Amino acid sequence: MVSVRYLFDQLLREEWRMHARLFGGWRFAAFPVFLAALAAGTAAFFALAGSETETLLAGLHVVVALVGLQVGSIGLVGRDALGDLLGDVTLLVFSARTLPVSERRLLAVFVGKDVLYYAVLFIAPLVVGVAPLVVLADLSVTALPRLLASAWLAFAFGVGTSLLLVGLATRSRLLAALVGAGALAGGLFRPDLVVAFTPFGLYADPSLTRLAVSVAVPLLAAVVGFSLFEFDRTGTTRTAGNQFRRLTDLFGERDEQGLLAKSLLDVARSSGSLWKVLLSQGLIFGVVAILLGYIPDILVGVRPSPGLTLGAVLALGAFTTYNWLCQYDDAAFFGTYPIDLAAVFEAKLWAFLLLAIPAGGFYLALGSVVFGPTSLLVGAAVYVPVAIYVFGVTAYVAGLRPTELLFDTPVFMAFSGAIMAVLLPLVVLAIAYPLAPTRISLAAVALSLVAGLLGVVGYRRAGPKWTRRARAGDL
């Protein structure tokens, strides 16, 4: 029997080698440094804007918990990895088919490796990045170790919650949806429970009881999630109807090569199917709704515009939809067929609009019920062009490999700079909205339309750029 320690060492080595080889060796080591600098700039911006330290640190815990949810969703990707469905990528986690290692044990070690890897390379730099608050606000130096510990536990909380939902989803998607909705509703109506049962409570009011709860809750959630997780290895034959033909017939001349149908089926037939698009946007909506509803004085004593805030943040969250649309693609694959990469990016854009616009529209409509319809109309006007901007920037900067290339420090810096150039002005306009709603609404819509046009330019240039790089062997 292969030991857990041996598996852990090999999987950790595989993760580092994969990133180091993809991103130019030790250039990848600069990634945490850039993350810390980005976090420091963000913390300084909000501190100078008059935000309270406790509010900023609560936001930090929310961010790391969301990162944990994303890492924990490896249960979805891991299911595909175990089935060797990730294109040219064959990870050690797939070796359960050929080596005497159980899938459940291999996946558990795989997730444990991811937790340690991301806690050191991603979460710790984010905590280091709040150091300016020691000078610009009232954060004590002695509180930093406690902040790091609670941030790591918040990350583990996100991972455990995600694993629990994924495990439930393999048994009953309805039950998983009900549990997720119940957790969001609990956060909306009883925010005190969020403090009581999450690691932020450990930072805000440290005690042995809160420490025990902060450790026990994510651990228990992860154990239950793993115990419920079912693998698609029953040996039974699975069949599917010819949906590809139906989709190409439906799209007609718009999709003569079947690229749009393929993109949609890639998402629909992967773990989580199309529901993960709605779920990911729902998580963003829930977090923003809680912040808007229960922290009205988040900045300079003014409640930001719910519509502008939701429209901008949901548009940024649409990045995950682009990521899923490209999860099985790379430029080299299409190079073996008489297919122009420009046509591939056009198909991705149409698929992106078909998936991201309805999902964002649903939560903006839900937001109009919670916060009122007035500012949400502005949010809807902002959402579509900013989402197109996110698509264009991602396509141009990262091509068909958004997950891998965004870990490349120079690429990630370019992506972050382009996103911040639009997101920060929208955040400022959302804060200033109560001062002059009409003029600020017009300014926000004008800004988003310009961003949308720039997104179209980025999308149109993505095809020629990545074609040149593919022909030069520079991928």
Image (tube, helix red, strand yellow):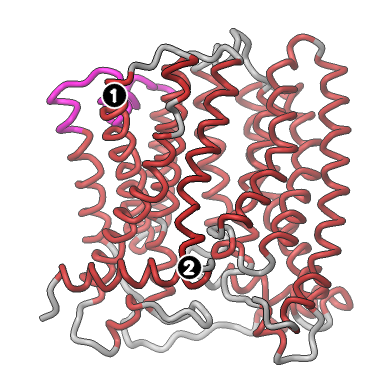
Which quadrant would residue 398 be assigned to in this image?
bottom right
* In magenta segment, residue 69: no
Q: Which residue is mark 1?
A: 203
In the image, which disc is placed on residue 356?
none
Does 354 sit left or right of 453 as displayed? left
Which portion, as a residue range, is magenta?
189-213
Q: Secondary structure at mark 2?
A: helix
In this picture, residue 328 sits left or right of residue 337: left
Find the distance from the CA under tag 2 to the CA under tag 1. Answer: 37 Å
Residue 137: x, y in percent? 46, 13
The image position of residue 444, as x and y in percent, is 82, 29
Residue 184 image position (x, y, % from top left) = 44, 35
Q: Main secondary structure of the magenta part?
A: helix
Which residue occupies 56% across, 22% down?
A: 292
Up-down: is 411 above or below 187?
A: below
Where, by quadrant of the figure, is residue 426 drawn?
top right
Q: Quadrant of residue 427?
A: top right
Q: Is residue 243 left or right of residue 462?
A: left
| Nearest-to-viewer mark from 2 and 1 | 2
Q: Nearer the viewer, residue 468 or 313?
A: 468
Left or right, 182 with respect to 398, comes to left
Look at the picture and state if 45 lies above or below 286: above
Tell which of 283 and 200 is nearer to you: 200
- Which residue is label 2 attached to? 25
Foreground of the two, 230 or 208 = 208
The quadrant of the picture occupied by the N terminus is bottom left
**Given the current orientation, which residue lies at the most extreme front position?**
26
Which amino acid type is marked by label 2? Gly
